[in-house]
Image (tube, rainbow, N blue to C red):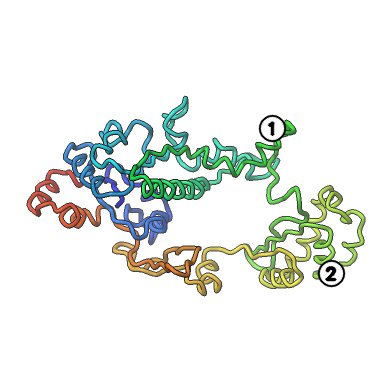
Amino acid sequence: IKVESQSRPDLWRIVSPFAGDKPGFDRAGLFATANVQKYSLALNLKDPRGIKIARQLVARADIVVESYRPGAMQRFGLDYENLKKVKPDIIMLSTCMYGQTGPLAQLPGFGLTLTAATGISNLTGWPDRTPQPSGEYTDFIVPRFNVLALMAALDYRRRTGKGQYMDISQMEASLHFMSPVIMDYTVNGREVDRMGNRSTSAAPHGVYKCLGNDSWCAIAVAGDKEWQAFCAAIGRQNLADDPRFASLPARKYNEDELDRLIEEWTEGRNAGEVMQLLQEAGISAGIVENGEQLDSDPQLKHRHYYWELDHPEMGKMSYSGMPIQFSETPYSITRGAPCLGEHTEYICTELLKMPAEDFVSLLNEGVFH
């Protein structure tokens, strides 16, 4: 059950793309993909009666998750110490930028600023250009840690009968992706610079233009043996014998020329042809797919990754499925993302057993705005 309000909706409800390019809380594609199977309760937490309803929800819940700035839940009277009084074995998880304590704890933010704070933005882009924002990169890292923590807490409660509170710093959860950079500085005092699509351990390593409009293929050649196989596959034995490219250090030193020669070969060929030829030779290669290609990708269709469901505002919607398939517990998506407050009446009258006349009265008085 997702608790929101019209004055404080989920941020992703106001982020494009919108269905039909028409903005609206219930027309945001990004929100839709991340909120399947959820119920939406519109609740005004500035109203004491809204707080009371939230407490009633907690009384029947296993887990409470919140991502406000530190102190907000305490001001609502919905912090862990208060919720324990409602349900002693409740599990609560707070996830915010820097965690609940420390000199930066009160700073608000979201994915774009967090990728800068963690240093991720400093590694995306080219050496002669400014750092490139990574958008919601951290937004897709942190939830995995959150889920793992919640599973551990549920197991702890199963064994002990006790709940617990978890304070998760999104910055700290994201930093493990920066381990090589941190290690290099710690051990060698060296700062890793932006290198575009290149790699310290492979050459060629990049995205190369192919035949057609905005058509590209990613190619990575890891070692000398692969380099020999690559040259044989593209029919360029002269490159294999060229001393400028005979070893990885030599290829790295002459990488600009190497990339020029490879793109000279790829730009006259279809990206799919390039990928298939190189993959058959044991070389890592893949088409850079756009939205249309991903939507019709035969591999994703075969594994039933996409689920098409009706949405009240957006009509037919394609939802991303689970990348993990369990042999004993198969899953299905039966309900798409909710409109804001779509299930308010059901939650209050059916789950919380609120009398219908009380619900109507609270509705008219703005508690469910």
**Element class at badge 2:** helix
Q: Residue furthest front?
A: 159
Looking at the rendered structure, the kind of residue marked 2 is: Ala
Q: Residues within 10 Å of mark 2 (few under 14, many from 20)?
A: some
Q: Residue furthest left?
A: 357
Q: Eyeballing the image, is 353 above or below 336?
A: above
In terms of sequence position, does the residue under pointer 2 or pointer 1 come before the other?
Answer: 1
Q: In the image, what residue occupies the spot 84% across and 70% down?
A: 235
Looking at the rendered structure, the kind of residue marked 1 is: Thr
Q: In the image, what residue occupies the spot 46% across and 37% down?
A: 97
Q: Which residue is mark 2?
A: 232
Where residue 173 appears, x then y in whole percent?
52, 41
Q: In the image, what residue occupies the spot 47% across and 37% down?
A: 169
| Along the viewing direction, whichever of 181 and 365 lies nearer the viewer | 181
Q: Residues within 10 Å of mark 1 (few under 14, many from 20)?
A: few
Q: Is residue 361 left or right of residue 138?
A: left
**Element class at badge 1:** helix
| Along the viewing direction, whichever of 35 and 66 lies nearer the viewer | 66
Cα separation, mark 2 vs mark 1, equals 41 Å
Where residue 228 appears, x then y in whole percent?
85, 64
Count the numbered circles shown: 2
Q: Which residue is mark 1?
A: 186
Q: Eyeballing the image, is 259 above or below 123?
A: below
Q: Is residue 245 left or right of residue 82?
A: right
Q: Image quadrant of residue 313?
A: bottom left
| Along the viewing direction, whichever of 150 and 198 lies nearer the viewer | 150
